[in-house]
Image: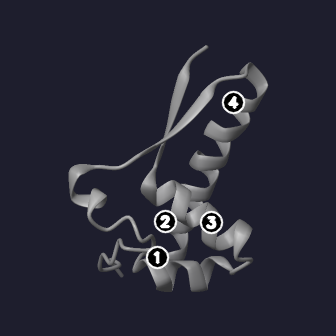
Amino acid sequence: MRTLVISLDQFEAMRLCDAEALDQEEAGRRMGISRGTIQRLLYSGRKVIIEAMLHNDAIVINLKESEERNAGLHTHQRKCRT
């Protein structure tokens, strides 16, 4: 069995869009990133989850050192490039 990693950003995008049923625009506003970035995070995070389910692998949410203290979620307040 392998261990696959999901970043905190991927997890939070999926939580906001899938569990909280927010649209990508609102999820992006809450995370401080663009809708396009949300879309990429959803695609890559869901891909990891499907891969893990298909192969009975473990999933780990990766907290970087800078993220550990902000694990209250939607903490990534980055400026969007326009």
Instruction: Measuring from the top left, give residue 81's x and y in whole percent.
Output: 32, 77
- Amino acid bearing label 3: Arg
Task: Give the CA separation, mark 4 to mark 2.
Answer: 21 Å
Give the crowd class for mark 3: few <14, some 14-19, many >=20 residues within 10 Å: some
- Please determine whether, in this image, residue 81 is positioned above or below residue 47: below
Residue at image coords 57%, 79%? 27
Q: Return the residue at label 3.
A: 15
Q: Residue 34 has which mark?
A: 1
- Amino acid bearing label 1: Ser
Query: Of callouts 3 and 4, which one flags the residue occurring earlier in the amino acid sequence?
Result: 3
Q: Return the residue at label 2.
A: 37
Of the two numbered discs 2 and 3 in the rendering, the one whose residue sits closer to the viewer: 3
Task: Give the CA separation, mark 4 to mark 1.
Answer: 26 Å
Of the two numbered discs 3 and 4 in the rendering, the one whose residue sits closer to the viewer: 3
Residue at image coords 31%, 68%? 70
Of the two numbered discs 4 and 1 in the rendering, the one whose residue sits closer to the viewer: 4
Q: Residue furthest left?
A: 66
- Image quadrant in which the C terminus is located: bottom left
Q: Quadrant of residue 73?
A: bottom left
Q: Left or right? Give the position of 7 relative to 35.
A: left
Q: Left or right? Give the position of 47 relative to 32.
A: right
